[in-house]
Image: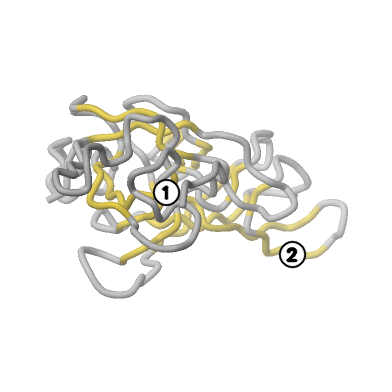
Amino acid sequence: MANTQAYFGFTQYQGGAGGAPTFAQSTRRIASGNSTAIYTGDPVNFVSAANGYIQQAAAGTTPLAGIFVGCKYLSTSQKRTVFSNYWPGSDATGDVEAYVIDDPNSRFIVQTSTTAFPMTGTASTMTSGVIGQLAQFTIGTGSSNTGRSGAYLSAVGSTATYPFQIIDYQVGVSNGGDPTSQYCNVIVGFNNEILRSNGAVTGIS
């Protein structure tokens, strides 16, 4: 069955190189004056690694700080602490406590956009063409109703500073599970991430 476009950002698939997700994460900060919304599944990078403030990442070659998965802040309007799966871009008194999956060996499921990603060929000669390659994302449009990201993979190639590496296809019966159709889901790992143990952009180690 052909896939349909339904971007959901980056969802943790494995913690480290195998096994169930461990949700290994770090606590970071969002400045209360940061007016850009950040959604669960959004890639984020540092405004300044020295002070731990993060922001929604834009496609590029800046090392990622990880994948955003929620936050806690003192709501100015509600006058109480709010736990939220997205940062709305306002309504915080003081810094926002943000949660980021940053294990450099984590794996994530993400939907792809263009016809460059699906497997090609006939049933007997099917080839992937993208497993092991590096990939760029587009931030997309998140949902304030669900708090979910709208990020997706938008380019694939050999650019050494692309932020992700494609590990495999997610094959199944749900949407995105057809690897031969546009908008297929793939499993990725970090390529350009600030906590990678070797400190270099050399692909998954």
Q: Amino acid at mark 2?
A: Thr
Rendering coords of residue 24 (x, y %):
36, 66
Q: Find numbered disc 2 in the image and state the secondary structure of the residue it sits on.
A: strand
User: Which residue is depicted at the point 37% across and 25% down?
Assistant: 60
Q: How is the image coloured?
A: secondary structure
Is 61 above or below relative to 196? above
Is 168 above or below relative to 150? below
Judge from the rendering whether residue 120 lies leftward or rightward of residue 89; answer left or right.
Answer: left
Q: Nearer the viewer, mark 1 or mark 2?
A: 1
Compare residues 183 and 155 and report the one nearer the observer: 183
Compare residues 162 and 111 and report the one nearer the observer: 111
Q: Find numbered disc 1 in the image and state the secondary structure of the residue it sits on.
A: strand
Label 2 belongs to which residue? Answer: 81
Compare residues 157 and 61 and report the one nearer the observer: 157
Compare residues 47 and 171 and report the one nearer the observer: 171
User: Which residue is depicted at the point 40% across and 62% down?
Assistant: 25
User: Which residue is depicted at the point 54% across and 54% down?
Assistant: 98
User: Which residue is depicted at the point 34% across and 44% down?
Assistant: 180
Rendering coords of residue 106 (x, y %):
29, 58
Label 1 belongs to which residue? Answer: 110
Sort mark 2 into few (<14), some (14-19) or many (20+) by Cα contacts within 10 Å: few
Rendering coords of residue 178 (x, y %):
39, 52
